[in-house]
Amino acid sequence: MRARTPVVLLLSFVLVQVAEVRSPAAGQDKELPKKEPDKDSSKKMEPKWPTNIGGKGLKDWLKDATENPDPAVREFALKTLPGFGPDGRKECSKKLLQRMTAERDPGVKFTVFNVAATLGLEDSDLPDAISHLANVVDGAAPGGLSRLHAIQTLAMFGPKAEGAVTKLTGGACNDPAYETRRTIAQCLGRVGFNERTGPNLKALNRLAATLAHDISAAVRMEALQSLVVLGPPWAGPPPGKGVPAPTNWKDAKFIADRMRERLVVRKGGGIVEADKQLEIWCRVVLMRFDEKELVNEDHLNAITKNLEDTSDLGPKLQALQALALFGERAGTQVDKVVPLLTNEDPLVMTGVLTALSAMGVKGEPALDSLVKTEKFWAEKRDKRQKDDDFKKLVANLKPEELKQVINALTEEQMRLAVANTIKYIKDSKPGKPGGDMVGAAPAAGDKKP
């Protein structure tokens, strides 16, 4: 299984869809029989893309985009091509590829790059496009926009652009523009993965050894996030469908050691990585790339220490995201998360509920507090409904309209979020946060039973 566990679980998935995707438990009413879908429903739902825009068809716009001598006309025509939809890919692919190499106007060239990635290219044209963009990355003037736009375009192609990793990890990583270096770090997280062999080792090593040590905190953060997204290198293909691939711990050690360098305590006090938020993700990467560190409670303790921070919201939110990533493994920290249920900040509450949900059965000690929290938000909702201004606002609404307004209240949304978190935890099984819920998967750090 691909090690692309999201940094944060999708809260809407946890909070809204739980009841909809699970089979009813014993004693519950069964779902009503579903209506048989219309045989032609899929066709009816397909968007109908235009065949004519501004009085011209695709071929006319494509001709303007690739042959008109006026760069302004070419640029406008290029931006129009995606409006014809994915069916235009076959017609445009080869000519867009040709224009990528022939275009001399920098602004129009950037537009060609973006349109090629947005509209897509035929598989037969993609290798040449990737090669051209990689050469731009490697050969463009330092600090220039050509390199930046080429990197951004490669990122849009995702894993299909893995062939560009060698050039992306070359001299461009020393570009004087921090935004270019940050974009490289982001791009490597998107293209540095192969479905057959797993994370690209060159991408992992450059992210860990260079970009995660960059002078810019923004670059370091992007590098750490990409390392989390890619995950540790594989020792071989997954042994079966839905089963994680074995980890190459020998190669993973290089990345883990680079993280240890960021966590070294200086002689004068404090660690090398002075940014609290980045320290959190250095620890996350270290735990992901060293199985011995995964069981080291010191790292989780250091991460949850940030939950006590009252001066800066950032580290607190990052800590909650990190705990959510480790799922049941973070269950040892449940008692440190529960006190935040009294925090009424929607961002904090979202992080708390996501983390507790991810803990699955290990989140059960939080159930009593969650029940009290649900009651708290229900009372706030009821108080809002009794407010004179609210009564005036809804005085002329029909019952179904009033219900919609109440459901949209922040207080009701929070109550519902807490209620679904309670259900999610109760339905969880060991190794399966959310139980047998469709689409549920173990978080990073969890091991299948």
Image: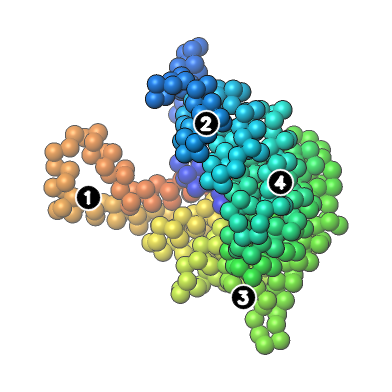
Residue 67 location, quadrant: top right
Relative placement, left or right, of 238 versus 395 is right
Q: Nearer the viewer, mark 2 or mark 1?
A: 2
Which of disc 4 and disc 3 is earlier in sequence? 4
- Image quadrant occupied by the N terminus: top right
Looking at the rendered structure, which numbered label has been put on residue 68?
A: 2
Residue wearing tag 4: 134
Residue wearing tag 3: 274
Is residue 151 positioned above or below 56 on the image?
A: below
Is disc 1 surrounded by few (<14), some (14 to 19) or many (20+) residues within 10 Å?
Answer: some
The residue type indicated by label 3 comes to Ala
Which of disc 4 and disc 2 is earlier in sequence? 2
* Residue at x 50% of width, y 73% of height: 309
The residue type indicated by label 1 comes to Gln
* Residue at x 51% of width, y 42% of height: 13
- Tag count: 4
For the residues marked 1 and 3, what is the alpha-carbon distance in whole angstroms? 47 Å
* Residue at x 69% of width, y 33% of height: 126
The residue type indicated by label 4 comes to Ala
Is residue 421 positioned above or below 347 on the image?
A: above
**Is residue 252 in sight in this rendering?**
yes
Is disc 3 surrounded by few (<14), some (14 to 19) or many (20+) residues within 10 Å?
Answer: few
Residue nearest the viewer, comparing 117 with 139 = 139
Mark 4 lies on a secondary structure that is: helix
In contact (CB < 8 Å): disc 1 and disc 3 = no
Residue wearing tag 1: 385
**Is residue 65 in sight in this rendering?**
no
Relative placement, left or right, of 238 versus 428 is right
For the residues marked 2 and 4, what is the alpha-carbon distance in whole angstroms? 27 Å
Which of disc 4 and disc 1 is earlier in sequence? 4
For the residues marked 1 and 4, what is the alpha-carbon distance in whole angstroms? 59 Å
